[in-house]
Structure formats: structure tokens, C-alpha cells
Image (cartoon, coloured by chain):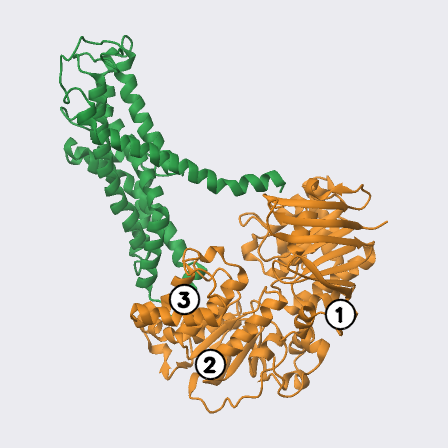
Chain colours: A green, B orange
Amino acid sequence: MSASGVVSMRSLPRLRAAIRAFGFAGLALIAVAVGLSDVIARAPADAAGMGPILAPPSSQFLLGTDALGRDLLSETLHALAITLIHAGLATAITLAAGSLSGFVAARMPWKGGVLLRWFAGILGAVPALLLAILFVGIATRDYAAIAAGLAAAPLAFSRTYDRARALSVSRHAEFARATGIQGTTLMRRDLAYEFRDTFLTIFARALAAVTITLSTMSFLGFGAVPPHRDLGLMIAAARASYLQAWWVAGFPALALLLLILFARLAAALDEGERP
Amino acid sequence: MSALQIDDLRVARGAAGRAELERFSLSLEPGETVVLLGEAGSGKEAIMRVLGGLPEPGYEISGTLKFPNGEAERASRHTRPHPRAAWLPGPYPSPFNPHATVLSQLSRVLARKLGVPLASGEAELNVVLRRLDGAPPLDALDAPPGDLRGETIAWGLFAMAFAQTPELLLADHPLSGLAPLHARALVAALLAEQKRAGFAILYAAAGTETARLLGGRLIVMRHGRVVEEGPVARLATSQAHAYTQMLFKGAVGVPPPPRNTGRGEPVLQVYGLEIRPRGRNDDAPDSLTFELRRGASLALIGEDGSGRRDLARTLIGLRRVASGRVVLDAVDIGILSESMLARMRRRIALITGDDDVLDPRMTIWDTVAEPLRAHLRLPRNILSDYGEAALKRVGLASLKPNTSIAALSAFDKRRLQVARAIVTAPVLAVLDEPLRGLDAFAQSVMLDLLKNFRGTEGPALLVITADFAVARTLAETALVMKDGRVVERGTLRDLPANSTEPFTRSLIEASGSLAQGGLPPEGAEG
């Protein structure tokens, strides 16, 4: 291996840490913007007739207006808040139904865990978007966030299960067992360290995946229900005016892009659950 | 013309940092052997890194190097291996990609080095392996490194180095972690090849045994400086510097003072335990009966794959007892449930030569306190007292308790295992190759710690080793195992003189301390 190769390999963890920090800083900025949306936004959500229809970005309307004369900056901020809330709920479901249960299943006695892993493997082979739409079909569009969270859970389950299995047969686990450490203590130990070391990465990875799923569902008409418009629904509603008013779809799309990009960076570009 | 000339080589971390190596000079003649001996951080690693063209980033390097058929160059500019020098690493830690076969990786490196097609590289490797006495066939290397034994990988690495027809061989601890029997065979092959091809050897060694076998010139290093230098033959018998004396004194091989080991209560009783040779299910199984009392010590001697680890795992309840009875601390472990077995094992300590056994995510403090927390649920202040006392005893009290295990050296990890064993106050301690891969200084310290542990806590010891000298230092009786069978048993004091089994004799001959120094005086202490 050349000296330059050594340098690049050694600097990789620092580069990843920098990428992660940048991603979380971006997410924090988005969270602050969403938290202050009622202050920053000049109009409440869905307030039509605030200005001329399809007005381009100007000093009066920074991001322009849409076909109903709504202020696009206010609408984008409100939609971003709804997207983030739904994605947060979906991520929590993914972490609980996927990651946490995968960890516990890996330590289940008998073949229970193996069977669950097998089932999760089959579900994981189906695109998460299709699964989420199926869940919405069984329930209603009001449960789109839960559906997106459950749809991302099989892959999160498989990933965590495999990691927990590798930990349970590692040399240090065998050493602990040989000196009388009980299986439950070992599981608690692994859970604590994995939570400390990888929780933020897993969270960010899941957030990116469910945001894409939720927005696509809304775009296709299976997600958010008006008047609670999220970014996917905003982009879908702007389809009729794409050609003459690029800003109507462009700015919501940019907000969505930034949210997903920062989440992916916060996960240090770690390959994760596919949407 | 010299095979290697090093002038005023200095390696330091940053411009004003502590020097890892101070103004080191060396002239190595063709066909000569120079052994660099010292503990970790003595400076020999820095020399090997610079010569191998692998300088650490962030280090300041000064001085000049002159390789065969080359001009003198600045050491800081030497950033790739020299074409006439072959690099010979050891199998531990593995220098291979775990997902590809060893054969494919060796062939690829060799083909690239020789500038020939991949098939020719493999053919060259085959030619050398067939020439080396005791080497495995080429096919034996056609597996991922995780599936191969250390000695098989070492033969492959040696063959690859020899196939390069080097003028200079840079051997960086190539025998580290190998059993003496295999180390001896590899050294014999190395010397035979040197005689045949006439290359010079610069050998970084951790222990004195390899230096004794290799001969040539010895350079003893400590803290980046040369402590003593001279022919191995002279330094092995007469050392001027106290550090060299300490290295050569070598506590390994010196038996413990006679102990009255028949009086303690029985800790481990084995009745008719059937052990079956691996992969030979149709063979009649061996039946084993023995007793180990508190304070006594039994060694299971054999090579990797001899069945000694399987036997030890059965004895501590990690493998089910198929036939016979194993009574641990007056409880028949064959009738215990898994959770009861786990409770039983709280009174067992394990100290191994494998540095992966400590969880790298944990801290020093968590590692020591875990058995106390999990087993005894002691109050925090008592827990803290126990832990600190144990860390002090092994010399780790100066490290911050929240230091991550991943940041520790192999020697520190080994000592931490002893500290963890101390806090459990075990009735039985399993020592699985406890000195493997350590340098002479670290071995000496570890032996003192283990003797102190044995004397203070007084557990029965089950020592697993391939080195007869280590067994003799830590145990009184032994079972010699080969291919899953016990081929000989007896006291370690008598076996060197009375053994009739050829395999046992070969192990005794391979253990350098016994072979060199003969039997130590009665009752000598390490």
C-alpha cells in the first residue's frame, strides 16, 4: 500500500465525522425554521388570495405565489413542518418496529428470531413504497406516516438483526459468557453501546428513507390529506403550472431535497433502508 | 558493498514531538543476519516501517538509507518498497483481506512484484513451497485466511518472500503468535534459504528464542535507542546492560517452586469424559479421568486443532458433556440448565492470548467492573475499591478509567484480563495461551502477574498452550494432546526426562528455554 493510500484510509473517519456534523447542523437548521414557521411565515397555512396568482419571486413575495395566490414561502414552511412531523413519526415507528425488535429477535431462543428474520427478508425484498401504499389501502390515508414507518421497518429489522447476531457470536461475547455473564446482561450491554454509537446514524438513515417514501406517497395521492399539505402534495398540486411557473414546484422540491440531503449526510452517507 | 546502509535515522511524531527512534545507524552485509530485539515502542517498528516504505503520516523522518544496487536516498523520500527487498510480515495480525483466498492474494502480490502474469506468480509460489522442508502444499493456501491456521499462512508468507529472490529480507515479527514447533521449522527454512540464496536478513523480534535460533548480530533496543549490540552467541550468555539481562533471563521455562497441590478441595473432577478425535466419528473415543484441586495447575499441551480448546470448553460448560461426568466446584455440570451453567461460570476466570476477547466498545473501568456488577450487585463505592485495587495490581491504574479498550495495546489488554480475573476471585482460571504474541519484556511481566494472581487468589489453573516451556512455568501436571487424543500425561518436572511419546519429545525440543538451558535447578523461581 502506498503512503498516500495510508493517509487517505486514516483520514476517512475524520471525513465521515465532518460530513455527519454538517448533516446534523443542516437538520437542526431545518428544525429551527420549522419551529419558527408561525413567526417567519407571513400567512397562515392555505391562505388563498394573498397576492396575484403565479407571481414570480420578488421582494414582496420572496418565493412567489401559486395558482391560488398563496404566499409560497409561507406554504413551503408549513408543508415542511408537516413533512418533518410525519417523517419523525414514521422514523420512530421504523426504529421501534424495525431496529429495536430486530435486536431483541436476534437473542430470541429457539427459532423464533430466525423465522422473523426470514419473514423480514421477504418483506424487505418488496419496495417500501409499494408496501406503504398497500398498508394505506388496508387502512386510510390518515395513517400514511404509520404506513411509511412500517414499510421501512423490515429492512431496518434485517440490518439490526444481522448486526446483533454478529455481536452475539463475537469473540468478546463468548469470553463474557465463559466468565458467567448472562445472556440478558450481554443483550443490555450490546443495546447500550449500539444505541450510543449508532443510534444517530440509524435515525438519520431512516429519516431520509421515510421522507422519500412519504413525499412520493403524497405526490401519488396516497399520503397527506388536504388541507394538511406536505411537500409531496405541494409538488403534485403544482403539476398544472410547471411550465409557466417553475417556482411553484421548484421551491418545495428544493426544501425536500435539502431535508433528504441533510439526513443522508447526517448518516455519513451510510447505505440504508431503501425507500 | 553492503546490503543495507542506514545512517542517522530518526523518527519523531511531528517536528517537536517525542522521538520514536533516535539516530539509528546500521550496516548490513550480504548474507548477514541482524536481529532487532525489544519491546513494543522500542524503535524497531519505526525502523521496519521506514524500510518497508510505509511511513506513518504526521511523523518527521530524517537520515539516509542505501539499499542494494542503489544510491543513498533521504529516508523521508522512501515511500514505497524497494524492488530488491522482500517484506515478510507475520500471520498475526492477519495482513490479508478476509474475503479472498490466501493463495490468490499471495499470487497477486508476487506477480506484481516480479512483473509476471498471475498464473506465473502462483507457479513461483508452488516451486518455493515444494522446496521448503515442512511446508504445506500449494492447495492448502486456497482458502480465506480465517479458515487457515497461523502456521499455514506463515509458510505462504515465507514462500512469497523467498520467491522474490531478494537481496534483503525485512522480517517484521514473522513468527509472532506461532507455536514453538512451527516457529522452529520456519526458522530452519529461513536459514536454509539464506544459505542457498545469500540474502541479508533484518529481523524484528519480540522474544529472545528466535534470536538464539537465527544467530548473527543482535541489536537490543529500548525507547528508540540501541541498548546493547553484539553477536547473538555472546549476548545470549553474557549481557552488559541490565535490560538485556532481563530479556535473556527469560522467566518462561522456569518451573514454579514445588507446591503441595494435593490438599485443596477438588475444583474440577472429570470421570470417564469421552473425547472424540475431530472428523473421526467412527474411531473409539478416548476416555479421560482426572481431578484438579484448588491451587493446583494442569496444562493441556498441544497444537491448534489438537482438541485442547474443545476439551477446555467442555470442562467449563460451554460445550455439552456427551458422555462421562464433569464436576465443577462440587456440581455435576451435565445436569445444569443453561442459566444455571452461566451462574456456575461466575467462579471461572479466563485469560487468553486473543486480543479480540475484550469488547472494544467498553472502557477499562466497565471491563473490570462488569463481573462485579453482573454477579454481586455491589454498592458503587465497594465496586470502585475492588476495581481500583485490581487495576493497581496489574499496573494499569495510571490509565484513565474511561479509556476505550480499542485504544489499548495488546499488553495492556492482556493485563486488563488479569485485573478482571482478580476481581472475580475465581475457583478455576483458564489460561489460554496467555503469553501468545507478547514480547520478552511483556511476557516476563505477565508471568509475574499470573504467579501473583495464583498465589493471592489461589484458583486451580487450567493452562492451554502449545509451548512446553510456558506449561512448565505455569503448571505442574500436563495432558499432551494430538488430533483430539491425549497421547501422554504426567508431571511437567518428569516429562522432559521420561517422555516416550515422539510428539511430546518434539514439543519439548521445540521449546527453546528447555532445549537451550536444560532443566532448571530444583525449586528455582522465575
Dot 2 falls on which chain?
Answer: B
Where, by quadrant of the figure, is residue B385 drawn? bottom left
From mark 3 to mark 2, how far is it between C-alphas?
A: 18 Å
Q: Could you tell whether A30 is left or right of B59 in the image?
A: left
Where, by quadrant of the figure, is residue B231 drawn? bottom right
> Mark 3 or mark 2: which comes first in sequence?
3
Q: Could you tell whether A152 is left or right of B433 in the image?
A: left
Find numbered disc 3 in the image and state the secondary structure of the residue it sits on.
Answer: helix
Quadrant of the frame with the C terminus of chain A? top left
Where, by quadrant of the figure, is residue B79 drawn? top right
x and y percent of residue A129 in the render? Answer: 28, 32
x and y percent of residue B517 in the render? Answer: 71, 78
- Res. A230 visible in picture: no
> Mark 2 or mark 1: which comes first in sequence?
1
Mark 2 is surrounded, within 10 Å at the Cα level, by few (under 14), some (14 to 19) or many (20 or more) other residues, namely: few
Q: Which residue sits at x=24%, y=37%?
A: A88
Give the amino acid at mark 2: Thr
**Which mark is drawn over residue B456?**
2
Give the amino acid at mark 3: Val
Quadrant of the frame with the N terminus of chain A? top right
**Which mark is drawn over residue B235?**
1
- What is the residue that sits farthest to the front in this orientation? B16
x and y percent of residue B254 in the render? Answer: 63, 80
Mark 3 lies on residue: B368
